[in-house]
Image (cartoon, rainbow, N blue to C red):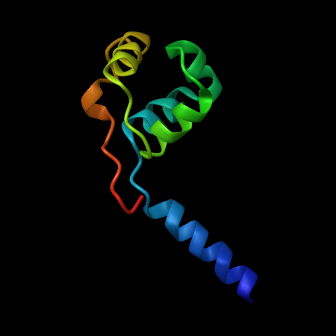
């Protein structure tokens, strides 16, 4: 029973996370972290953190996202992670 509870807690936590604009952009285009990383010139782990709202890109990297996405993603589209995250 504990195993079921743990899975339910995980599902609720995932469902309640706010989706970042990067995550929505990637989902709409069915692209993964590695493809984005190759496109903007960073490590896929950084893309993962940005997609989950756990990191903020440098101004240089934000500019690369804007260029790579044709202007669909801007520096303002990356939320500042909270202390609790």
Q: Quadrant of the N terminus?
A: bottom right
Q: Is residue 65 left or right of residue 7?
A: left
Residue 28 or residue 68, whichever sits in front: 68
Residue sitting at x 60%, y 34%: 45
State the image coordinates of residue 61 (x, y, percent, origin top left).
40, 19
Q: Disc count in the image? A: 0
Residue 74 falls in image quadrant: top left
Q: Give the vertical position of 57 relative to 7 (above or below).
A: above
Residue 24 or residue 34, whichever sits in front: 34
Residue sitting at x 35%, y 21%: 62
Residue sitting at x 54%, y 13%: 39
Residue 24 falls in image quadrant: top left
* Farthest bottom residue in view: 1
State the image coordinates of residue 82 (x, y, percent, origin top left).
33, 55
Residue sitting at x 38%, y 63%: 84
State the image coordinates of residue 42 (x, y, percent, origin top left).
54, 20
Residue 77 or residue 41, whichever sits in front: 41
Q: Give the vertical position of 2 relative to 51 (above or below).
A: below
Q: Is residue 12 left or right of residue 57?
A: right
State the image coordinates of residue 8 (x, y, percent, origin top left).
61, 75
Q: Mark yes or no: residue 5 visible.
A: yes
Q: Quadrant of the C terminus?
A: bottom left
Q: Mark yes or no: residue 32 visible.
A: no
Residue 18 or residue 57, whichever sits in front: 57
Q: Give the vertical position of 3 relative to 67 (above or below).
A: below
């Amino acid at each position: 029973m504990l195993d079921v509870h743990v899975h339910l807690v995980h599902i609720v936590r995932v469902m309640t996370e706010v989706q970042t604009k990067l995550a929505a952009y990637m989902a709409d285009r069915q692209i993964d972290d590695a493809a984005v990383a190759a496109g903007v010139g960073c490590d896929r782990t950084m893309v993962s953190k940005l997609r989950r709202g756990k990191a903020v890109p440098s101004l240089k990297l934000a500019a690369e996202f804007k260029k790579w996405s044709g202007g669909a993603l801007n520096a303002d589209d990356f939320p500042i992670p909270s202390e609790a995250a």
